[in-house]
């Protein structure tokens, strides 16, 4: 006998939990899988977060399906990349 009942599952405070998880991933550098090479140093990040947040990174990562890509950002300082990443991971700079 099949039940016709349907359930709605809702994660309260989803946005807060995701924001907190992104912040922790960035700070702890857990599961990083892409390196952004800048003029003065390299910065680690997560492909899925970059692709979800930026059409530029999504296009590059789709064209280069390497398991751990290195993306060279010619002429860009690490401090600028870190500011962009802070915006991507935390929603504010």
Image (cartoon, rainbow, N blue to C red):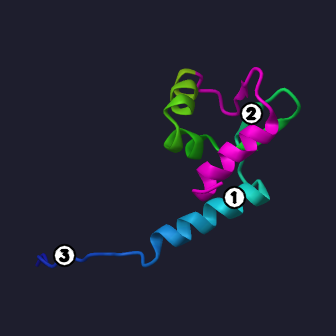
Whichever of labels 1 and 2 marks the residue nearer the N terminus, that label is 1
70 is within the stretch colored magenta: yes
Q: Residue at x 74, y 33 (%)?
A: 36
Q: Which disc, if any, is residue 6? A: 3
Q: CA distance from mark 3 to mark 2?
A: 45 Å
Q: Residue at x 62, y 58 (%)?
A: 90
Which quadrant of the structure image shows residue 68?
Answer: top right
Whether tag 3 and tag 2 are in contact, CB under 8 A, the answer is no
Residues drawn in magenta? 64-93
Whichever of labels 1 and 3 marks the residue nearer the N terminus, that label is 3
Q: Residue at x 74, y 39 (%)?
A: 80
| Residue 57 drawn at (x, y percent) | 57, 32
Find disc 2 in the rendering and name its residue. Answer: 36
Element type where label 1 sits in the image: helix
**Is residue 42 or residue 79 the one in the foreground?**
79
- Dot 3 crowding, Cα within 10 Å, few <14, some 14–19, many 20+: few
In the displayed structure, 56 sits above or below 31; it is above
Q: Residue furthest front?
A: 93
Find disc 1 in the rendering and name its residue. Answer: 25
Which quadrant of the structure image shows residue 77?
Answer: top right
90 is within the stretch colored magenta: yes
| Residue 38 drawn at (x, y percent) | 80, 29
In the displayed structure, 2 sits above or below 27; it is below
Q: Which disc, if any, is residue 86? A: none
Q: Is residue 84 left or right of residue 16?
A: right
Q: Is residue 55 left or right of residue 31?
A: left
Element type where label 3 sits in the image: loop
| Residue 59 drawn at (x, y percent) | 51, 26
Q: Residue furthest right?
A: 40
């Amino acid at each position: 006998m099949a039940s016709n009942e349907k359930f709605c599952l809702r994660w309260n405070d989803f946005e807060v939990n995701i924001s907190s998880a992104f912040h922790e991933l960035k700070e702890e550098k857990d599961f990083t899988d892409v390196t952004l090479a800048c003029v003065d140093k390299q910065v680690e990040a997560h492909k899925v977060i970059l692709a979800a947040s930026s059409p530029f990174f999504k296009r590059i990562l789709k064209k280069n399906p390497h398991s751990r890509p290195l993306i060279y950002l010619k002429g860009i300082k690490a401090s600028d990349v870190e500011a962009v990443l802070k915006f991507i991971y935390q929603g504010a700079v």
